[in-house]
Image (tube, rainbow, N blue to C red):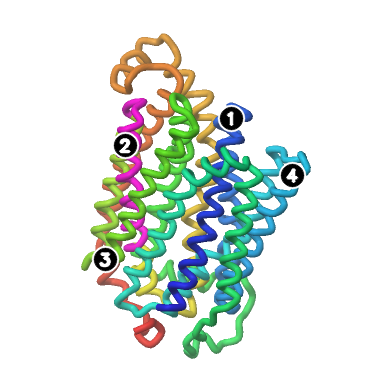
């Protein structure tokens, strides 16, 4: 647990630095271009490399020392941040370069999540996996809580250059911790000792494992489809707020709402998890989708902040329950590639979501809610009027309702309802105990 806490702290520092840069660059691009599409493309270039590289990254994580995989991830992200800093200092920073270096950093980060998850299973006793996952969610929440406010302060005092250089310093801190710690070796099992074949064959092992356990596969497919719907909505939250509020207000909203993630992670860390994980997953998924609907109903900072707070509160609970299910059901020697395959499937839809989010807002929903049509005026009475931002609000309401219908329909699948009882736990000796 001491080693896990050291790794957790290092990743927390790194996440805070990344949050600084992501917030500052996102606001800079949107305010420079005034384009929702240009802003959404940052998310597209962040996600696409994860989709393409994650499955192979997971196979490599299972083959490599997982500490080295984490070091590689942080080193690559630090390199991309350093290049952005050089471009900015020399006056050559342009939006296409931001997209490119964002993609490079994302490619290296593809190694982080499978390695981090697999390391947790090696270090943490089985009965405390839910608490460890709660701590990981708390770390992300702390970063999201601190980063926007800290970015606003640093931007004011030492400009965008200071933000990016601060981010680079946090990567160095995380790398130092990773270089100093040592991890236990992977437990030896007959399947581990078999000589590795090609990357594709190893990746197929992960797919076969999921395919043979239809309840786990159904859970991944459900969240893949749901992520497409919510991805369209979430990427438009910043343009929605900036349509009637300032960047400083946006930072405050993001910080307060991210505290929901902190509380959600704290709940899981103290609680230790429910007896029935799958029921908890679907209950809080419905809650989070109701929050998306309420956020679009009015151009109101208090309403959006409360909705976002509850939305982020649900995420650590949903994520912790899902991950613990997989940690318990998947043998440790397969976890790197299975977790990476899950990540690739769950994020495969996000590039499409980010690609269509901007055009949907700019060319369909926003023009419609800025028109004088009778239908727009009627909808405007429900959504707090017409004009800038109300099209994005309507989009949130529509996609929120569709996501709720999908959640209700998915829970009717028997294999998904019974996944905890139908899929046996992994061999006890391959899990920390």
Question: Is the C terminus in the top left, top right, bottom left or bottom right quadrant?
Answer: bottom left
If you read the primary sequence from the N terminus, does the residue marked by circle 4 or circle 3 appear first? 4
**Dots 2 and 1: beta carbons under 8 Å?**
no
Q: Which residues are magenta?
A: 297-321
Q: Nearer the viewer, mark 4 or mark 2?
A: 4
Q: Could you tell me how far apart the alpha carbons at marks 2 and 1 are, in whole angstroms?
A: 31 Å
Where is 259 relative to 53, above or below? above
Label 3 environment density (alpha carbons within 10 Å; few <14, some 14–19, many ≥20): few
**Does the magenta run of residues contain 363?**
no
Where is residue 91 drawn, in percent x and y? 76, 39
The residue pinned by badge 4 equals: 89
Q: CA distance from mark 3 to mark 1?
A: 41 Å
User: For mark 3, what is the residue?
Assistant: 270
Q: Which residue is mark 2?
A: 401
In front: label 3 or label 2: 3
Which of label 2 and label 1 is nearer to you?
A: 1
Where is 207 relative to 34, above or below? Answer: below
Q: CA distance from mark 4 to mark 2?
A: 46 Å
Of residues 232 and 352, the one nearer the viewer is 232
Q: Alpha carbon of mark 3 to alpha carbon of mark 2: how far?
A: 32 Å
The first of marks 4 and 2 along the sequence is 4
Q: Residues within 10 Å of mark 4 (few under 14, many from 20)?
A: few
**Mark 4 vs 2: CB contact within 8 A:** no
Q: Who is closer to the viewer here, 35 or 401?
A: 35
Could you say where residue 174 lies in the image, as x and y percent from the top left?
56, 66
The tag earlier along the polypeptide, 3 or 1, is: 1
Give percent across and percent down for residue 323: 38, 65
Residue depicted at x 37% and y 66%:
133
Residue that label 1 marks: 31
Q: Secondary structure at mark 4?
A: helix
């Amino acid at each position: 647990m001491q080693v896990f806490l050291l790794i957790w702290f290092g990743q927390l520092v790194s996440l805070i630095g990344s949050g600084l840069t992501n917030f500052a660059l996102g606001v800079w691009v949107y305010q420079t271009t005034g384009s929702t599409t240009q802003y959404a493309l940052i998310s597209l270039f962040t996600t696409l490399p994860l989709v393409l590289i994650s499955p192979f990254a997971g196979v490599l994580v299972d083959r490599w020392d997982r500490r080295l995989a984490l070091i590689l991830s942080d080193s690559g992200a630090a390199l991309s941040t350093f290049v952005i800093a050089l471009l900015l200092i020399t006056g050559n920073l342009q939006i296409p370069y931001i997209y490119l270096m964002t993609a490079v950093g994302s490619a290296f980060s593809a190694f982080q999540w499978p390695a981090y998850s697999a390391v947790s299973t090696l270090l943490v006793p089985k009965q405390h996996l839910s608490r460890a996952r709660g701590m990981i969610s708390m770390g992300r929440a702390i970063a999201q809580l601190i980063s926007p406010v800290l970015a606003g302060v640093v931007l004011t005092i030492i400009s965008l250059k200071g933000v990016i250089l601060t981010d680079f310093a946090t990567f160095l801190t995380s790398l130092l911790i990773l270089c100093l710690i040592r991890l236990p070796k992977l437990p030896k099992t007959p399947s581990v000792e078999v000589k590795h074949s090609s990357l594709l064959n190893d990746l197929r092992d992960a797919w076969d494992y999921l395919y043979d356990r239809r309840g786990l596969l159904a859970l991944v497919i459900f969240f893949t489809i749901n992520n497409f719907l919510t991805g369209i909505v979430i990427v438009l939250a910043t343009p929605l707020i900036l349509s009637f509020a300032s960047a400083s207000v946006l930072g405050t909203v993001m910080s307060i709402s991210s505290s929901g993630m902190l509380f959600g992670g704290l709940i899981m860390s103290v609680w230790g998890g429910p007896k029935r994980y799958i029921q908890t997953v679907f209950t809080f998924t419905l809650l989070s989708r109701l929050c998306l609907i309420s956020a679009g109903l009015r151009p109101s900072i208090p309403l959006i902040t409360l909705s976002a707070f509850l939305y982020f509160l649900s995420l650590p609970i949903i994520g912790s329950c899902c991950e613990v299910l997989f940690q318990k059901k998947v043998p440790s020697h397969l976890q790197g590639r299975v977790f990476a395959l899950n990540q690739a499937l769950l994020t495969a839809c996000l590039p499409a979501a980010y690609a269509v989010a901007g055009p949907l807002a700019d060319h369909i929903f926003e023009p419609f809610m800025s028109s004088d049509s009778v239908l727009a005026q009627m909808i405007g009475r429900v959504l707090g009027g017409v004009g800038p931002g109300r099209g994005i609000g309507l989009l949130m309401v529509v996609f929120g309702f569709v996501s709720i219908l999908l959640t209700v329909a998915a829970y009717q699948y028997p294999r998904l309802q019974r996944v905890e009882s139908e899929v046996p736990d992994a061999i006890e000796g391959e899990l920390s105990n």
